Image: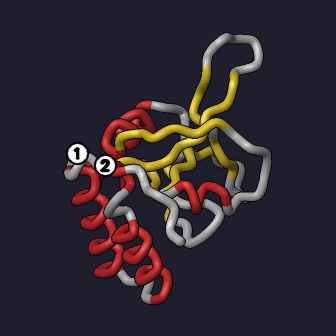
Amino acid sequence: MNQPRDKGLNGNEKIEQAVCQLQQEPTQEQLAHTLTVIRRRMRENGQVVVAVEAVAKEQNLQLATVRTEDGRRWFAAFTSFEEEMKGGGAVKSTFLADIQQLFEVAREADVAGVILNPWNRRLALDQTLLAVVLGI
């Protein structure tokens, strides 16, 4: 039985399908298609799931990051709560974030970009790809 989905996540399966196709056929054309799908979801006011973590000496929260093998830090975003749970790590507090706002914050933050679904069928959107999606 399917779990109820938040309305802001409806349509994110299109992103998952496009990323899957890109992994099967990693061409410039497929990358362009995948970025277009993400841009459409962004313009539909689509949302993603993000994790937050407490900052040690401060009394506020910040977006959780993941580190890639090369040592770079990325914001992690998930197309669904199911994708977020695939990490199997410590339980984190999560909330829904507007795709466009997340991408804009990532452009200003000291991170390499945003990784969608870092545990499964991931897509790393570096600063250049974020600019493409945002139309900058």
Quarter assignment of residue 60: top right
Q: Position of residue 83 (x, y in %)?
A: 58, 61
Of the pair 22 and 92, the residue shown nearer to us: 92
Image point (53%, 46%), residue name: 112
Q: Is label 2 in a helix, a strand or a loop?
A: helix
- Asked if the residues shown at circle 2 and circle 1 are in contact, with their CB atoms under 8 angstroms apart, the answer is yes
Q: Position of residue 27 (x, y in %)?
A: 38, 83
Q: Earlier in the sequence, mark 2 or mark 1?
A: 2
Dot 2 corresponds to which residue? 131
The image shows a total of numbered marks equal to: 2
Q: Residues within 10 Å of mark 1 (few under 14, many from 20)?
A: few
Which amino acid, mark 1? Ile
Residue 89, compared with residue 121, is above or below; it is above
Q: Is label 1 in a helix, a strand or a loop?
A: loop
Q: Position of residue 50 (x, y in %)?
A: 53, 43
Which amino acid, mark 2? Ala
Gap between marks 2 and 1, in whole Å? 5 Å
Q: Residues within 10 Å of mark 2 (few under 14, many from 20)?
A: some
The disc label shown at residue 71, or none: none
Residue 101, compared with residue 121, is above or below; it is above
The disc label shown at residue 136, or none: 1
